Image (cartoon, grey):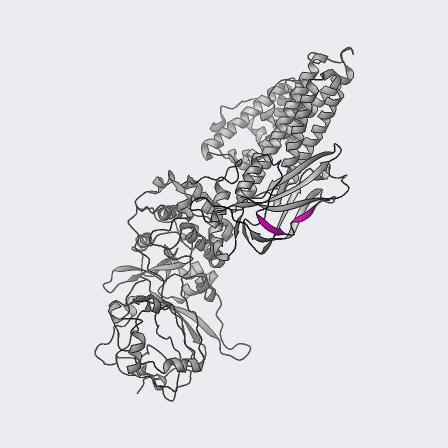
Amino acid sequence: MSLWNLVSNMPPEEFSSLPAEFPRSLRCLLAEWLENQPWEFINGSDTFCSSVASGMLSAMLEKLRSAAGSDGQILQQVSSIENTFRRDPLRLVAVVRAILEGEKAAVLKRDHHLPLSFHRRQEELKFSLGLQRLQHRIREIQALREEGPGLDGAMQGPMVPRELPNLILEAMKELEAAKQQVLKRIQIWKRQQQLAGNGAIFEENLAPLQKRCENLFEVYLQLQQQVMAASTELGPELVPRLLERFNEVLSSLVKSSFLVEKQPPQVLKTQTKFQASVRFLLGPRLLKAAPKPYMVRADMVTEKQARELELSNYSNILSESTGEILHNTVALETNPTNGTCCANFKNVLLKKIKRCERKGSESVTEEKCAVLFSTNVVLTPSNVSIHLQVLSLPIVVIVHGNQDNNAKATVLWDNAFSDIERVPFVVAERVPWDKMCDTLNLKFMAEVQTTKGLLKEHYFFLAQKIFNDHSASPEDFQSRHVSWAQFNKEILPGRGFTFWQWFDGVLDLTKRCLKSYWSDRLIMGFISKQYVCKLLSMKPDGTFLLRFSDSEIGGVTIAYVIRGKDGSSQVENIQPFSAKDLSIRSLGDRIRDLEQLRNLYPNTPKDQAFGSHYNKEQTGKDGRGYVSTAIKMTVESERDQQPPNTMGVPPEGPQVPMFNLPVLQHELHPENLQPLLAPMCPPTSFCSQPIPRAYPTVESNIMMAPDRLTSPFHSPSPMLSPPSLSHCQDPAFRSPGPFMPNQYMHGEVSQLLPAGPSAEPQDQEMPELPPFQAVEDASLQSPPRWMSPSMEQSSSELDQFLQDVPLLPPFAPLPQHSGYPNSSLSSWGLGEARWDDSMRPGHA
């Protein structure tokens, strides 16, 4: 963005103190052109500065006349500018520089920073002007050497023979400064490449940088040629010193122009192929006469080896590779079509890695290494041999996929918080919390591929989570520092995972299932359960919002308002949905299924908010003649559950059996069942409160009535509630979860479902926050979770299992532990047949 775009809407009084010789109306006409000239870097009154200023004045007048057209007022102002500054172009430079500095000050006062594009343009202008100055110096040296002092009028002022060494030394100093600019620009490119690993925008095109290196190299050759030609005048003492400085400039420029254009994966698994490429920016210029391509080799190095190479300025040869890499030698080839010189590694395989001795409690996923790319080249036409080496970004090598999460944390931390110039691979152990917020936001937006980032309310929740502090205010966290241990070494209190493991689960869930919801600002996401209650408690019945689970990795839950039996407002949280759940039925369709949900917080009708996310339901028969089915989600809250019937009298109304068993030839005998379940679930572990569970039920509208159902569950005895296996005292007998209602269906194989999610502990009291903005401009969302691993058993296996299964005795209702209402998915056929009383199991 140009500086003019930032200041054009500011009030005129902001610039009342700026020089009046240059009207604001002309500044508007020139706009970005004015900012693309090196006004700031023309410091001096020598012949070079005067000539550059004169050229800029001529270009400005031509551009103003072209923009003015037939506008007499503007043409009059242009004539005034010409009359004022023609005799003193350097005065124009001072006036325009003062105007631009005043505009920068106004932007800094308002925005506290200038656009990165502005700084980049200024750096390019400085380098370009430096090259022009160097070329001017070379012309002066050549003129002084060729014309000499005896030519009348040829040389004036300082241009005398005794000044030739001083002129050359001044030119050498400017050459070294230009080289430092190039090296700094290369370092910035490398740092931007590293930040791109966390999702930052990266201009990876190396063509401008290659052009800069080539231009500087040409100036280097011209200056060196003039020095060698003037060696007699310079004397035997000065020439060797100048040649040594020339060699240092060439060596550092050539070595720095050997870059890793495409980095290897920063989390690299053994026995996995990967790609990478290196580029030699000066290769097309220096290697064009090489008889055959040079070969580039890739080797793994440890952090210690990388440090030793850095200290030797990459002049040492690697003694030993720390890992075995196959297909690690590739030719460095020049492409005359696009003018590049690259070595492309397309089929590299890390076969194995040698682990080094780790520091303290460091794990293998904290151990950093790198790929070293190296080659020896002979430069033409000087025939100088140079050893080229370059390190990749830090790499964490893993041997199993379950190490990936922690390895990504190491890479994220290193990419975000390492310095441009550092000893490999040193990185801070503690960083400011605001920088961590920027990193998390950058990573989230990049992974999810969204333009909607995190809000300050989200940062507050994340700070409470990572610092385990619910008493501090948002401002208190701004001055804190977060450590690597808090980020991904220490387990969160009351949880079984670290902060990063939890955050990465949210990233994965949102990327896979919730991208469009998040981008539409339908998910509040990073917010505590307690603060949700504060937001929803005063809202009408059916108001809901979506938040990421605080106690589970990769879960999203729906919180909604319902009325209690006493008419008071209650907030329920549906058990979280995982990515697997949402792959079965989308979040939008689940929200449509639930009639309890009416308005998305604060007051948007759910069909209006989520209508574009609903999937069209199939109706009728498919192409093969089958009746279509649809999965629907329901939520059974605690108040919907029937209390156990303790009188032995069948309840009124239609009866739904707790278990629907397949029609089997074996009868179930109650005396055989208790011995089987007793060691698994002792009755003493039961609570009296019911626990809502999420489970899928599959029912078909078209069913055959059984001739005889030999199951005890259709008898008029009290409704049975099976014990929760999660309360077993002996771990050896623990099961994935309790037997659930509808666990056995007519004509279906058995299905054993896991228990619901672990309970989310109540959040501690926290400071009051301003309410979230309307959902239109919020940015979060998440999905609920129900697990239903199907465990199919053959008929013979099921028969064998049921031979000794006795009748279930009546139990107390299951205890409520998770705090989530039941959600279940039911499959409804679209045919016309329905159950009647004669088909219901247990109907007399």
Instruction: Give the residue drawn at x 35%, y 72%.
Output: 739
Residue in front for this viewpoint, 585 or 413 = 413
Q: Position of residue 326 (x, y in %)?
A: 63, 52
Question: With 536 as the anchor, is 522 left or right in this view?
Answer: right
Q: What is the x, y in percent for residue 261?
A: 62, 44
Give left or right: position of 619 versus 120. left
Position of 382 relative to 173 (above/below): below
Q: Residue furthest bottom?
A: 707
Q: Quadrant of residue 539?
A: bottom left
Q: Please tell me how many numbered marks the rendered image carries.
A: 0
Instruction: Please state the extent of the stretch shown in magenta in the rendering.
Output: 313-335
Q: Is residue 692 left or right of residue 431?
A: left
Counting from the top left corner in percent of width and height, residue 457 is at 38, 47
The answer to whether residue 160 is visible is: no
Q: Is residue 571 magenta?
A: no
Q: Is residue 272 above or below residue 221?
A: below
The N terminus appears in which quarter of the rendering?
Answer: top right
The part of the image, by quadrant, that contains residue 832 is bottom left
Return the residue nearer the eye: 148 or 451: 148
| Magenta stretch encompasses residue 330 | yes
In the image, residue 162 lies at what x, y percent?
70, 12
